[in-house]
Image (cartoon, rainbow, N blue to C red):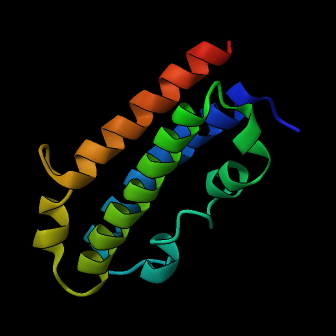
Amino acid sequence: MNTFGEQVQAAIGAHGMWKARLRQAIDTGSSDFKVDVVRQDNQCAFGKWLYGEGKGGFPSMADYEQARRLHAEFHGEAAKVLAHAVSGRPKEAHDAMQPGAPFVHVSSALVGTLMRLQRAAA
């Protein structure tokens, strides 16, 4: 079993990988991932941990709820980007990953929250 800090660190790394996967989907117009699965925030490793054993490890319920909400929003926005990418709308997908777009905003907020929680757990 990983510690809280290790789980959060893994989530931060996985988050970065999602950005790369989305860029690849934009470039190729295809993905091994399905939009409906990406939209679900409980299908990735962090989501499974978050809704399972990780729930009790947060410093407070407010911290848990913030991380859960941002994680769910991230998956929603990632699914929108992926849907554009695999539906022949690369410009819309690309635009959705530009500064100021909801995907970028929620992505930054999620990583910031996870980094704050990781520091608190150290």
**Vertical comparison of 76 with 47: above or below:** below
Q: Quadrant of the C terminus?
A: top right
Of 19 and 37, nearer the camera is 37
Q: Position of residue 40 (x, y in %)?
A: 52, 70
Q: Residue at horizontal 30%, vertical 79%?
A: 83
Q: Residue at horizontal 45%, vertical 44%?
A: 16
Q: Residue at horizontal 38%, vertical 56%?
A: 73
Q: Position of residue 9 (x, y in %)?
A: 62, 31
Q: Quadrant of the N terminus?
A: top right
Q: Residue at horizontal 80%, vertical 47%?
A: 53
User: Outermost residue, front direction?
Assistant: 61
Q: How many marks?
A: 0
The reply to whether residue 20 is in sight is no
Q: Quadrant of residue 58?
A: top right
The reply to whether residue 89 is in sight is yes
Q: Quadrant of residue 23?
A: bottom left
Q: Position of residue 90 (x, y in %)?
A: 17, 74
Q: Quadrant of residue 18?
A: bottom left
**Vertical comparison of 89 with 64: above or below:** below
User: Going by the image, does 80 lie left or right of 51?
Assistant: left
User: Outermost residue, bottom direction?
Assistant: 87
